[in-house]
Amino acid sequence: MKLKNWKEVTPGAVITEAGSSVKFKTGSWRSLKPVWIEENCIQCLFCWIYCPDMAVKVKDGKRTEFDYDYCKGCGICALECPGKKGNKAILMVEEEK
Amino acid sequence: MAKIVAVTGNEAVANALKQVNPDVCAAYPITPQTEMMQRFSSFVSDGKVKTEIILVESEHSSMSACVGACAAGGRVITATSSQGLALMYEILYIASGTRLPIVMPVVNRALSAPLNIHGDHSDSMGARDTGWIQLWSENAQEAYDNTIQAFRIAEHMDIRLPIMINMDGFIISHSIERMEYLDDDQVQNFVGEFKSLNPLLDLEHPVSYGPLILTDYYMEFRKAQDDVESKVPGVVLDVAKDFEKLSGRTYGLFETYRLDDAEIALIILNSAAGTSKDVVDEFRDKGIKAGLLKPRLYRPFPYKEIGEALKHLKAVCVLDRADAFGGSFGPVYMDIATSLYPYKERPVLINKIYGLGGRDYLPDHAKLVLNELVELVGNGTVKSYKEYIGVRE
């Protein structure tokens, strides 16, 4: 996204466009990345409930892949994940790996 | 038809606010402003204005309520003095940075400690870099006229900045003077309907106020604000021209008194300028070319225009009713020095600190200073660049 110059910004930093926070991609803040392991997932949706952003995507009542544009890598989903028979369905890995 | 009255400065400004009939007022009482807001509250109770008064527990809250009410889309006022202004400090920046045209008379009073309730410019001088426009007033008439003009300046679509109207505590706020009121409908027509910009209460066009602006945009917003400051003097002059048509009274960015052919001059804000003008006349009668400059628009400071008005002088004394501790000189002195710096030929500039905490400024003080300037021009020697006057040694 091209950044605006000082003549283009709104007076007093007022945001006049509703819902514009979707343009603020916070995924670049991440140092740890959650990885979803589908075979260990029981579809409890705890990750979806606990995610402080909206980075767990749900389709037809079932979770799908993470939305890495907004996931900040906080790890709450991995902590809360009950997994299947002791095997977590979400693991945190270092971002560059 | 103008109505001639005998009123205090507080009463005059309260009446101006009544005639404007703003939407919201959130204020907290503090000496010497108390009488002004007490009178305005009576106007609300008596149904003379339709203003909604918000009772708050402090000035930090009053300014915060003003920010909210103005962002919501209202014409908003408050008033304060001294410690009250100091307590607003954090929110003053939010009001200006958010570009909210809040109008605030400030009845100037000294800052604690030591505790003192009398006239002194330390309060507004401490807020001079907060991004608020500042108008200063010599007497009740100027305070009244400046208050009415302030709405037009602050609310101008090219400006949208908050504005404070300064007058001296007690000396003006509590002294009864003869002055002229405009008619209510004249004031109403002059200020016009309030036009809001991105109001929060416009549900058809939702907006967000106060977002986090990080390293990628903060400087752009600051540069935009600096650019707005440069447009203020032009608007102040345009509004003054319209006001003159209405009232017959002339206002500029500053007032000059017998300055054009002067060799020495005093620069002084507010009520003490009146005393000084009489002494300038006495010196003129003796054949000494003395003059005076009284700033009116102090923020943004009209550096260029003031530099042009002063460059021909031989010696100038800036009298400050506040000190800027650690800055070596009083605040007005530093601004005048900056405005004269671009000129190769410029007057010798000295600084006197006077009248702190309401200490009387007498004609003898002005005489003392003008005599020192005469001597300085004669022998070319500066006794002292900065000195307190009217203080026991």
Image (cartoon, grey):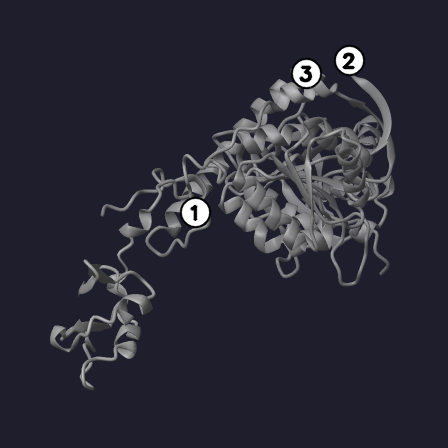
The answer to whether B80 is drawn above or below residue B287 in the figure is below
Q: Nearer the viewer, residue B199 or B90?
A: B199
How crowded is the residue under tag 1: few (<14 C-alpha within 10 Å), some, or many (20+)?
Answer: some
Q: Chain of mark 1?
A: B
Say left or right for B305 vs B106: left
Q: Quadrant of residue B3?
A: top right
Q: Badges 3 and 2: C-beta atoms under 8 Å apart? A: no
Structural distance between the alpha carbons of marks 1 and 2: 45 Å
Horizontal and vertical percent position of residue B120? 76, 49
Give the residue number, with chain letter if any, for mark 1. Answer: B222
Q: Nearer the viewer, residue B242 or B50?
A: B50
How crowded is the residue under tag 2: few (<14 C-alpha within 10 Å), some, or many (20+)?
Answer: few
Horizontal and vertical percent position of residue B273? 76, 36
Q: Badges 1 and 2: C-beta atoms under 8 Å apart? A: no
Q: Residue furthest top?
A: B1
Q: Earlier in the sequence, mark 1 or mark 3?
A: 1
Q: Earlier in the sequence, mark 1 or mark 2?
A: 2
Q: Earlier in the sequence, mark 3 or mark 2?
A: 2
Say left or right for B298 vs B183: left
How crowded is the residue under tag 3: few (<14 C-alpha within 10 Å), some, or many (20+)?
Answer: some
The answer to whether A75 is drawn above or below residue B80 in the figure is below
Is there one chain holding both mark 1 and mark 3?
Answer: yes
Q: Residue type at mark 3?
A: Leu
Say left or right for B142 vs B311: right
Residue at the image point whose x is 75% and y is 35% from the top: B44
Front position among marks 1 and 2 = 2
Q: Residue type at mark 1?
A: Arg
Give the residue number, with chain letter if any, for mark 3. Answer: B246
Front position among marks 3 and 2 = 2
Residue at the image point whose x is 18% and y is 85% from the top: A85
Horizontal and vertical percent position of residue B196? 51, 32
Give the residue number, with chain letter if any, for mark 2. Answer: B1
